[in-house]
Image (tube, coloured by chain):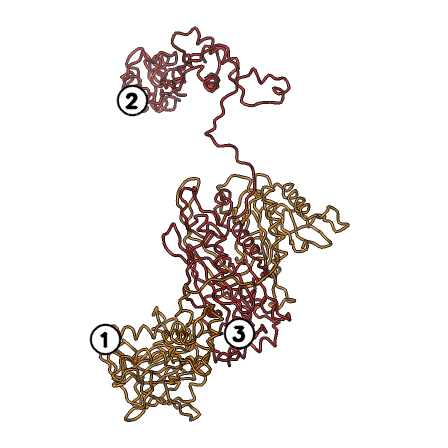
Chain colours: A red, B orange
């Protein structure tokens, strides 16, 4: 556009113009649409300092459609006057004329006509004067001719009140010469092209400066979900530590594997309808390893393996009840049972990261389903000190080096520990996980050798993700109400890197 | 240190009749003699009962505790069960008598008591305890009588615990009396009460049994990872109120377990106490010498590889809920729920919650109340992705989403009767359906899985098909390695509208397990 004909003309006119020129005037002169001139002005502006522009708005009076009609045909009242013959006209007939209703009252107030109410066949309208001057039409014609300024303020507002005139704002540009004014425009190149390379013409062309402060074009890419990016990192950490991934592709579990095998008694509140999702269909697990089941039953109800037991009536039906697993520890139990069947015993390190389901109160940080991370080590002679050591290595890979341990309670671990780390931002110790040594009542009925200890720990996947990515409401992260823009924009998951610029990092 | 003593005069007796057998067979009792309550002790006494009710008593279903001012009563007491209409008394904090039927009605609106009514509500006989003058002590597990109400001035307390678990009833009684025997004139003593069972057998309570357990010092050291002398370990345990001493060959520690520690059922419980006394943070951290080679679960390994390349193909990963409504996986897809082989939840949850959305584009907060109905586990990933699109309407088009995750189907060949399948689902949502784009994604996936086109040689092919969720003429079934692995196509406008969407949409969903 900048090298178009309108722009060229504009520049030539500007050269000879005194001070500058108005875009609307130029448009009228050239016989083009005002917008065309505006377009040329804008493209010339983009080339740099060639022209200077000033946005001006001017008001103009224009006739409305009705105003146009009256300028053409005369005002309603004048037409009414003209349609009354010397002998007068019945008012009813007058009113039926096109300008009748409007014109009648105006003509009356102008005292151009009168009404004889006492006439024989109804009210009759007569002329009062012989002729009239149609002022309104004259004034409108002035405006139409572009001479609105000849009318007084009062006259103009009167016509506007009658909706015959409107004031129109016109935005125009006052264009004057810029510091780099020239009538010949050399178009500035923006990009190198193949032709320029082959012809070498790039050497002679000026290139438009690149705006380095603007953003580039984001590549059209797909994205990975932040929670699953964190999951990938945790998987990496476990694999780096030599942990084998357990199969956890079963959301449906029996109460036996979810609770009983873990030595969680059938009367435990967690087995309430309020905390666990039980299934209507399929309601019961049909296959259970019965000899193992009997050992579990005995341990719960009578004790054994050095334990007093819980001393209650253990019911097989209760153990058969299917549910949506409340923890992946059920999968760990299955894995440990399989391990115990392999003789001789070989030590193992297992992990899993998968979905679990809890029928709990929902709020900004809790959902009915979330992901649990679990690590398990089974070997001879493992101690609480070993558990703490493993935890230290694990959390170091997350960039967490300050750990403290607090006594806790789990139905299936004893001793149990809550793991805390110091949060620099919140300036307090926060819980980062739960851990413990599995109870002998759980391990021995499986058939694991007596001096084999199994240490385990777990944490949720959602919590570290929300902390890492600064998300306060879990629903924006998990589920269909996810904030897709957040997914598009979320950075790489680097668990051992601090958030924010390096200058705010503090030594642990 | 806690002692059960026989009274100088008559022993309080609680006689259980056989009518209780079907509803609430067990009862235990004890007396706290010459106790001195203050306001704080009194409040604590009530609070302890409530706490016990909530946890070990499993919300009064297993055990219910009743405490009474003994001076207002006269034994022997009878624990029986009667028809609700035959039970009439003035309950706690009310000033007139009601029958049990009337009380059941009244307490339906009591925020605290309404949770316990179900324990006896539909039974023919309700449990009730009388004294020798016919005064009602309580109607367990609902409410005590007003007559024997305990106040700060009460000097002698009669405690009864009734329930369906004998062990728990005994433990609960032991806990209450040990905790409050401190405030009796004869400190740490509890007066015995006798309970006569329907078979005539007589038991004296509280049991207040002390148990002795033998633990080897080197076992404690080995399990914790410390190196303390047996004497030190015994000291640590004694500090935890488990009186211990070294006996025998110098390696054995005899631990006395008081009635306040019903939680100690195995040596590992004692070991934990030793570790706590030692201080967890004092234990030296060591690494196990366990040498293992790690293996990935093949299905997860495949999933991780595929995710990366599908994102590279321009699709964005979603993570949707596994639990949803029947409508989501059936009606909205033009199917009947029975055809889905979905698993059904027996206690479906309707969750209503306030959801705060921070709209990035307009920097505003909007709040919405959402209803989440959880009836089934999903049998397809499609509804989750469509709901994700519906919740992100303001995002620029096209929306290209995918998810690789588990669905659940009933399967009687599995031990629990159901199994997961790992599905891959992708959707394209735009002003045009983009079937060729979804088709192209499928081709790319097959390329990544090294599955050649063409049904021969274990390749893949797609054949025109129909599906209630798809637009007629724009649906195909995908066959690979000799089996049907899923479908792709343009979604039916009914599906689009039912998920509150407005643009055309095409999708592909396959089972990736055949590619392991």
Q: Residues within 10 Å of mark 1 (few under 14, many from 20)?
A: few
Number of the label disc, if any, that sits on residue B324? none
Q: Nearer the viewer, residue A199 or B490?
A: A199
Residue at numbered disc 1 = B38
Tag in front: 3 or 1: 1
Q: Quadrant of the N terminus of chain B?
A: bottom left
Q: Quadrant of the C terminus of chain B?
A: bottom right
Residue at numbered disc 3 = A318
Q: Which is nearer the N-term, disc 2 or disc 3?
A: 2
Do discs 1 and 2 belong to a common subunit?
no
Residue at numbered disc 2 = A119
Place of residue A14 in the rendered image (x, y in percent of width and height, measured from the top left): 44, 9
Q: Is residue A279 above or below residue A65?
A: below
Query: Helix, strand or loop at disc 1?
Result: loop
Q: Chain of mark 3?
A: A
Residue A346 showing in the rendered view: yes
Q: Nearer the viewer, residue B217 or B423?
A: B217
Place of residue B376 in the rendered image (x, y in percent of width and height, measured from the top left): 54, 60
Place of residue A203 in the rendered image (x, y in percent of width and height, measured from the top left): 57, 17
Tag in front: 2 or 3: 3
């Amino acid at each position: 556009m900048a090298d178009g004909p309108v722009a060229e003309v504009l520049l030539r006119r500007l050269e000879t113009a005194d001070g500058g020129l108005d875009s609307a005037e130029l448009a009228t002169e050239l016989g083009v649409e005002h917008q065309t001139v505006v377009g040329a002005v804008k493209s010339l502006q983009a080339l740099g300092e060639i022209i200077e522009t000033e946005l001006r708005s001017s008001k103009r009076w224009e006739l409305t459609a009705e105003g146009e009609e009256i300028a053409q045909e005369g005002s309603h009242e004048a037409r009414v006057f003209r349609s009354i013959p010397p002998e007068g006209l019945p008012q009813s007939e007058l009113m039926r004329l096109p300008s009748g209703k409007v014109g009648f009252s105006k003509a009356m107030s102008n005292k151009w006509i009168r009404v004889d109410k006492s006439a024989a066949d109804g009210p009759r309208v007569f002329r009062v004067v012989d002729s009239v001057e149609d002022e309104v039409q004259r004034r409108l014609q002035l405006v139409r001719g572009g001479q609105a300024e000849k009318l007084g303020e009062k006259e103009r507002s009167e016509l506007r009140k009658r909706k015959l005139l409107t004031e129109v704002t016109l935005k125009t540009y006052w264009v004057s010469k810029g510091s780099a004014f020239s009538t010949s425009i050399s178009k500035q190149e923006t990009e190198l092209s193949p032709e320029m390379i082959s012809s070498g013409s790039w050497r002679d062309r000026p290139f438009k400066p690149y705006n380095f402060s603007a953003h580039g074009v984001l590549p059209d890419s797909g994205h990975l979900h932040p929670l699953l990016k964190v999951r990938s990192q945790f998987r990496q950490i476990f694999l780096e530590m030599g942990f084998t991934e357990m199969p956890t592709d079963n959301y449906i579990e029996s109460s036996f594997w979810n609770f009983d095998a873990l030595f969680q008694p059938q009367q435990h509140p967690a087995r309430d309808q309020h905390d666990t999702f039980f299934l209507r269909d399929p309601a019961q697990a049909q296959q259970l390893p019965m000899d193992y089941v009997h050992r579990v039953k005995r341990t719960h109800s009578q004790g054994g393996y050095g334990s007093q037991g819980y001393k209650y009536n253990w019911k097989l039906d209760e153990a058969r009840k299917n549910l949506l697993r409340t923890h992946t520890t059920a999968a760990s139990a299955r894995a440990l049972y399989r391990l115990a069947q392999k003789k001789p015993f070989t030590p193992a390190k297992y992990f899993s990261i998968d979905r679990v389901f809890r029928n709990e109160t929902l709020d900004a940080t809790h959902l009915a389903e979330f992901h649990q991370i679990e690590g398990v080590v089974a070997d001879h002679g493992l101690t609480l000190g070993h558990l703490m050591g493993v935890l230290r290595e694990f959390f170091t890979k997350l960039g967490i080096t300050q750990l403290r341990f607090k006594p806790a309670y789990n139905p299936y671990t004893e001793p149990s520990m809550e793991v805390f780390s110091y949060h620099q931002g919140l300036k307090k110790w926060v819980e980062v996980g739960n851990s413990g040594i599995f109870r002998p009542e759980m391990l021995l009925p499986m058939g694991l050798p007596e001096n084999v200890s199994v240490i385990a720990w777990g944490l949720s996947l959602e919590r570290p993700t929300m902390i890492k990515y600064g998300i306060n409401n879990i629903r924006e992260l998990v589920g269909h109400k996810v904030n897709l823009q957040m997914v598009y924009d979320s950075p790489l998951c680097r668990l051992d890197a601090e958030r924010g610029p390096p200058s705010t990092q503090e030594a642990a | 240190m806690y002692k059960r003593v026989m009274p100088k005069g008559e022993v309080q007796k609680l006689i259980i009749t056989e009518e209780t057998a079907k509803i609430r067979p067990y009862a235990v009792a004890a007396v706290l003699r010459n106790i001195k309550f203050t306001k704080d002790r009194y409040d604590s006494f009530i609070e302890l009962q409530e706490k016990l009710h909530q946890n070990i008593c499993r919300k009064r279903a297993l055990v219910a505790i009743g405490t009474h001012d003994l001076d207002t009563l006269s034994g022997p007491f009878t624990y029986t069960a009667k028809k609700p209409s035959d039970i009439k008394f003035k309950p706690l904090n009310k000033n007139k008598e009601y029958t049990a039927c009337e009380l059941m009605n009244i307490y339906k609106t009591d925020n605290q008591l309404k949770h316990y009514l179900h324990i006896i509500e539909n039974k023919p006989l309700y449990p009730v305890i009388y004294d020798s003058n016919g005064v009602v002590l309580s109607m367990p597990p609902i409410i005590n009588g007003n007559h024997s109400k305990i106040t700060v001035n009460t000097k002698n307390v009669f405690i009864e615990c009734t329930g369906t678990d004998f062990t728990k009833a005994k433990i609960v009684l032991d806990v209450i009396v040990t905790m409050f025997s401190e405030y009796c004139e004869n400190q740490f003593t509890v007066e015995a009460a006798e309970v006569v069972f329907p078979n005539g057998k007589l038991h004296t309570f509280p049991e207040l049994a002390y148990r002795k357990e033998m633990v080897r010092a080197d076992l404690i050291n080995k399990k914790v990872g410390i190196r303390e002398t047996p004497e030190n370990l015994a000291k640590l345990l004694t500090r935890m109120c488990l009186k211990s001493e070294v006996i025998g060959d110098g390696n054995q520690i005899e631990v006395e377990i008081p009635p306040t520690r019903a939680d100690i059922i195995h040596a590992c419980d004692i070991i934990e106490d030793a570790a706590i006394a030692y201080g967890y943070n004092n234990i030296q951290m060591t690494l196990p010498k366990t040498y293992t080679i790690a293996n990935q679960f093949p299905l997860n390994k495949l999933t991780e590889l595929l995710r990366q390349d599908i994102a590279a193909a321009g699709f964005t990963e979603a993570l949707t809920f596994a639990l949803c409504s029947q409508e989501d996986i059936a009606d909205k897809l033009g199917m009947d729920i029975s055809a889905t082989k979905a698993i059904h939840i027996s206690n479906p949850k309707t969750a209503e919650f306030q959801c705060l959305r921070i709209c990035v584009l307009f920097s505003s907060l909007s709040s919405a109340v959402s209803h989440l109905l959880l009836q089934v586990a999903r049998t397809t990933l499609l509804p989750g992705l469509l709901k994700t699109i519906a919740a992100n309407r303001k995002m620029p088009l096209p929306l290209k989403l995918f998810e690789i995750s588990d669905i659940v189907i009933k399967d009687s060949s599995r031990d629990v009767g159901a199994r997961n399948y790992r599905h891959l689902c992708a959707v394209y949502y735009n002003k045009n359906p983009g079937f060729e784009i979804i088709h192209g994604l499928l081709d790319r996936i097959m390329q990544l899985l090294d599955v050649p086109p063409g049904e021969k040689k274990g390749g893949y092919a797609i054949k025109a098909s129909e599906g209630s969720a798809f637009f007629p003429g724009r649906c195909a079934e995908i066959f690979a390695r000799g089996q049907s692995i899923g479908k792709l196509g343009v979604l039916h406008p009914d599906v689009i509208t039912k998920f509150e969407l407005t643009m055309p949409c095409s999708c592909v969903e396959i089972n990736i397990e055949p590619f392991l």
